[in-house]
């Protein structure tokens, strides 16, 4: 058997954590040792026995194996949560190549002064009938905020103030008249750690259907048997995944353990949060980016003290210091938001797997469109696959999807951004007083160039990704291989002069819709209209309450909202995300189209989806139209194998950046030369260094090296060598290096 090594930190503390020592794991201990395990090791000249913590496990020794000492024993007993978090930081540092400081900042809450903690609760002082009457009156007077409040109070007799003000867009001053009239009351309790009163009686449990029950049973039977794994819950939109999560949570709480639920911030709506509240009451805390540092710290302290058992939030909620963590759930696991953009550039899925291992917790990943990586692992048996194939509400059906070829529209003389089919559907819906979503995906995908006549996008001849348009010098560049060319004046395929950087914004779309459908009430939701605090929720609420006929927006509108009166979804330009300069562009497109299609026909009414595109035959579009994940998965995996992209191979990207461009270029040259010599790296498995996109950010120049390999451990070894080279050579003093594997 190949020897395995562990990086061990001796006598853990925030100061000692930066320095790990390597030990050999004796074969007898192999099964027991993972990140976070407490061990006893011989240390120093006299080999005195010291306590240590494992922060990484690897097959690659850092220096000659004869010199590596062996771990003496493992130690039992619970590891204090603070030490666990330090181990996690140390693991993240080595995994993602950040500094220890960056890793610690990510993992440990920043201590901030918090005002004496009080908890406010909003209570109704009227009966349901009286509330109904008030609701009607507020509706007639068009007091939107009050309508929302009364509706919420009809569902729950009391509401946590923080959540209510955040999610319903209410302020103290707007509530003053109601307080004065004695319609509502706000109760303030200092340091209450008991559940908010009123919830206990409101619990609602939906009986699960057969598929849901099977998924729950599988996890719980293994849980009871002490088996911990990663599960992939693959269930179509509306199949009832959230109900499955809640059932699992209920059980895990019942056996005295705690739960972290990750939900992308964009999907963490009032409706979603209330579903959890109704079931679990006040043992929940919610984390989001709008909390102040003090509020965050407070939440995490409550978790550490054991005052709460469920933390719901975006990726940072993963670092909730629960002592008895038993389950981690990652909803919408395919979401890009789970990847951190700043160092350490961690992925929540990976960190969750390590935390789950450290705590003996199970990990459940859920999605209607699983990431290719996760589904690949489920196919390999690395994850256990659970499937939900039907919509949970019996009346709700998947929508009919039609694909419209925009080239044909232009050829027939229709220059409008609405195809004839979409246009006639919209008119019909407006007449029937049903609602419409128009989806325009722009964010993050600007700057590729395509031909309006034939639909051809300007692509890299070497990489099969779109070229990025750089306005400053009017050139097109491939950010994978560095290929570049001048911006052509005519389409290289058909000679048409209608060639331009792509993209109509949501604002333009909104104006076009006003002209094309006079009298229609239109709401727009994008980065501009949601900049103000609370605006996001307000727009969604207004639309849900029928205050508009058409909601126009970016991907913000396709995430997890339930609008029962929406019967038509129009996808204005499906290609926008297809041409993103990224090997995942087809995956993103499929995912967005499927999620957007899932918005139609959620209620009793049948739904239609119209996908407008220049490439109706592209498999991401045909598969999304058929709502067939497996068809997409098979095709896409074939493509990844062919091109040598993950998950078919592992990809190590090394980003080097510096304010000093010359120093950066010298370092890049040195690194490629060094790696070529050390590993004989050449050809398609060794790309770059190429300019990152964008190349210069905040006066910092960035270049990336890509190295592909079928073996993970080889890439780890290469990364180790890169690290050593950097520490050794003076050349790298002004260079920051980040890794992504
Ligand atoms: P997902 O998370 O997969 O999108 P949800 O859990 O949000 O699905 O469920 C979609 C809708 O179906 C919700 O309105 C939910 O209340 C309802 N639902 C879920 N499970 C059931 C069930 N077993 N019986 C009836 N309705 C259900
Ligand atoms: Zn053309
Ligand atoms: Zn290229």
Image (cartoon, helix red, strand yellow):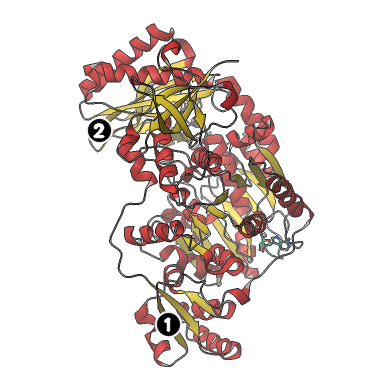
> Is residue 47 among the parts visible in the rendering?
yes
Q: Residues within 10 Å of mark 1 (few under 14, many from 20)?
A: some
Residue 231 x/y as whole percent: 65, 42
Q: Decide if ligand 3 comes within 8 Å of the CB at mark 2.
A: no
Q: Label 2, on which residue?
A: 700
Q: Nearer the viewer, residue 513 or 62?
A: 62
What secondary structure is found at the residue carrying circle 1?
A: strand
Residue 290, visible in the rendered structure: no
Residue 685 point in image, percent of width and height: 48, 15
**Residue 28, position as x, y percentages in the image:** 59, 24
Tell which of 639 and 659 is nearer to you. Answer: 659
Determine the CA span between mark 1 and mark 2. Answer: 51 Å
Residue carrying label 1: 186
Q: Are marks 1 and 2 in contact (CB under 8 Å)?
A: no
Q: Percent x, y for residue 431?
A: 63, 69
Count of numbered tags: 2
């Amino acid at each position: 058997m190949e020897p395995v090594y562990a990086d061990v930190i001796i006598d853990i503390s925030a100061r000692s954590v930066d320095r790990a020592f390597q030990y050999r794991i004796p074969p007898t201990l192999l099964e027991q040792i993972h990140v976070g395990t407490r061990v006893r090791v011989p240390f120093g000249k006299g080999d005195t026995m010291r306590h240590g913590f494992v922060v990484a496990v690897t097959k690659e020794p850092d220096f000659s194996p004869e010199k590596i000492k062996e771990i003496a024993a493992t130690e039992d007993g619970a590891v204090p949560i603070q030490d666990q978090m330090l181990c996690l930081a140390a693991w993240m540092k080595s995994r993602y190549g950040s500094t220890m400081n960056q890793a610690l900042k990510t993992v440990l809450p920043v201590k901030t002064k918090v005002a004496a903690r009080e908890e406010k609760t909003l209570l109704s002082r009227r009966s349901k009938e009286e509330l109904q009457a008030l609701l009607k009156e507020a509706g007639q007077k068009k007091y939107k905020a009050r309508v929302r409040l009364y509706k919420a109070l009809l569902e729950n007799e009391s509401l946590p103030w923080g959540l209510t003000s955040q999610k319903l867009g209410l302020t103290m001053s707007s509530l003053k008249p109601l307080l004065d009239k004695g319609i509502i009351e706000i109760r303030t309790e200092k340091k209450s750690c008991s559940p908010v009163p009123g919830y206990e009686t409101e619990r609602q449990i939906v009986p699960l259907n057969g598929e849901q029950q099977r998924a729950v049973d599988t996890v719980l039977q293994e849980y009871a048997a002490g088996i911990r794994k990663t599960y992939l819950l693959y269930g179509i939109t509306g199949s009832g995944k959230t109900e499955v999560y809640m059932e699992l949570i209920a059980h895990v709480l019942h056996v005295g353990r705690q739960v972290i639920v990750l939900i992308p911030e964009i999907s963490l709506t009032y409706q979603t949060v209330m579903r959890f509240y109704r079931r679990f009451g006040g043992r929940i805390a919610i984390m989001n980016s709008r909390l102040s540092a003090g509020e965050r710290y407070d939440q995490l302290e409550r978790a550490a003290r054991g005052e709460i058992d469920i933390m719901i939030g975006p990726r940072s909620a993963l670092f909730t210091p629960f002592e008895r963590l038993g389950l981690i759930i990652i909803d919408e696991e395919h979401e890009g938001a789970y990847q951190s953009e700043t160092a350490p550039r961690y992925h929540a899925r990976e960190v969750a797997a390590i935390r789950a291992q450290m705590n003996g917790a199970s990990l459940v990943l859920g999605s209607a469109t699983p990431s290719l990586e996760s589904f690949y692992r489920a196919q390999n048996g690395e994850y256990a696959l659970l499937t939900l194939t039907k919509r949970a509400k019996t009346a709700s059906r998947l929508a009919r999807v039609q694909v419209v070829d925009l080239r044909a529209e232009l050829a027939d003389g229709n220059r409008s951004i609405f195809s004839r089919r979409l246009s006639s559907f919209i008119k019909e819906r407006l007449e029937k007083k049903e609602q419409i979503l128009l989806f325009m995906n722009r964010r993050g995908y600007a700057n590729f160039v395509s031909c309006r006549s034939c639909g051809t996008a300007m692509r890299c001849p070497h990489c099969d990704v779109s070229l990025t348009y750089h306005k400053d010098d009017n050139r097109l560049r491939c950010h994978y291989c560095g290929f570049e060319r001048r911006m052509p004046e005519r389409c290289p395929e058909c000679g048409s002069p209608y060639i331009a950087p792509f993209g109509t914004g949501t604002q333009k779309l909104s104006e076009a819709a006003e002209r094309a459908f006079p009298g229609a009430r239109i709401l727009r939701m994008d980065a501009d209209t949601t900049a103000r605090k609370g605006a996001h929720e307000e727009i969604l609420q207004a639309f849900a309450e029928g205050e508009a006929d058409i909601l126009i927006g970016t991907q913000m509108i396709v995430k997890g909202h339930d609008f029962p009166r929406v019967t038509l979804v129009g996808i204005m330009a499906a290609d926008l995300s297809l041409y993103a300069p990224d090997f995942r562009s087809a995956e993103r497109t499929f995912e967005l189209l499927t999620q957007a299609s899932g918005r139609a026909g959620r209620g009793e009414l049948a739904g239609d989806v119209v996908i407008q595109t220049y490439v109706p035959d592209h498999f991401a579009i045909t598969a999304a139209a058929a709502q067939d994940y497996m068809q997409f998965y098979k095709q896409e995996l074939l493509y990844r194998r062919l091109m040598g992209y993950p998950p078919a191979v592992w990809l190590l990207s090394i980003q080097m950046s510096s304010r000093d461009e010359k120093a950066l270029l010298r370092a890049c040259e040195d690194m490629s030369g060094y790696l070529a010599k050390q590993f004989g790296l050449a050809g398609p498995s060794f790309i770059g260094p190429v300019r990152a996109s964008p190349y210069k950010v905040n006066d910092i120049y960035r270049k990336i090296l890509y190295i592909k390999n079928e073996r993970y451990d080889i890439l780890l070894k290469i990364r180790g060598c890169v690290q050593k080279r950097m520490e050794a050579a003076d050349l790298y003093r002004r260079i920051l290096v980040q890794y992504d594997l």
